[in-house]
Amino acid sequence: RVTCFGFAPPPVFCLDRMENRDEETVSRIEQAVENCICYVNDNDCVPHLSLSSIRKLAHELDIVDNRTEVMSFWRRFKIFWEYEGVPRNIEDALVTKSREKLAKVVGESNMVIPARVLVWMKKNFAGSLQGIGCCPEKMGRLGIFLCEDMVSDHLPEGYEDALDGLVA
């Protein structure tokens, strides 16, 4: 029996394509997924990347862009550097419009991380790490979280530190 440990797993597996496969193939896929344990380090962007998450992010950026195109450069500058808060109409539009379901494009399918167990190593407010068991299907649908450490959390050193933090 082979056990697979995955680190920074992208959502690559299409559950909605399983009905087109023969029973033996489905059985092998299910057995392989059953033997996978995957780890996600804090804000790592890769486990959230899929066609649908990128489309959702582009849709949200478009919403913000449509609300700020008439805004002066200096006002956008102040908002960007947090000298001024984000206008309420932008927040409201983003919350309202981002809840709308985008129509699927040709070839798009629901992506999941192929794992029986998915451990999300999240930093809490105190700065220590917690290992949280997550649903691989839901992780693949979360969308991209933009933050300053989304790329650095993907690097091997981040995973080494996170695993050390969990066992400490």
Image (cartoon, rainbow, N blue to C red):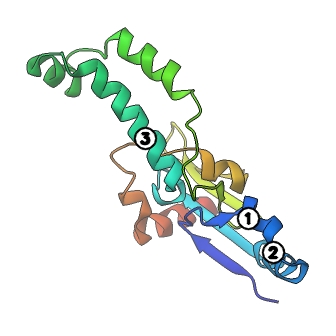
Q: Secondary structure at mark 3?
A: helix
Which amino acid type is marked by label 1?
Arg
Q: Position of residue 167 (x, y in %)?
A: 63, 64
Residue toward you, 142 or 40: 142
Q: Position of residue 14 (x, y in %)?
A: 68, 63
Q: Which residue is mark 1?
A: 17
Residue toward you, 23 or 154: 23
Q: Position of residue 43 (x, y in %)?
A: 47, 50
Q: Quadrant of the C terminus?
A: bottom right
Which amino acid type is marked by label 2?
Arg
Residue under the point 40% across and 67% down? 155
Residue 50 in sight from this viewpoint:
yes
Q: Which residue is mark 2?
A: 21
Q: Position of residue 75 (x, y in %)?
A: 15, 16
Graded by Cα atoms within 10 Å as few (under 14), some (14 to 19) or many (20 or more), the crowding at tag 1 reads: few
Q: Earlier in the sequence, mark 1 or mark 3?
A: 1
Depth check, mark 3 against mark 2: the one in front is 2
Q: Which mark is residue 71?
A: none
Which amino acid type is marked by label 3?
Leu
Quadrant of residue 86 within the rendered picture: top left
Q: CA distance from mark 2 to mark 1?
A: 8 Å
Q: Quadrant of the N terminus?
A: bottom right
Quadrant of residue 4 within the rendered picture: bottom right
Looking at the picture, does residue 7 appear above or below residue 15? Answer: below
Q: CA distance from mark 1 to mark 3?
A: 25 Å
Labelled pair 2, 1 in contact (Cβ < 8 Å)? yes
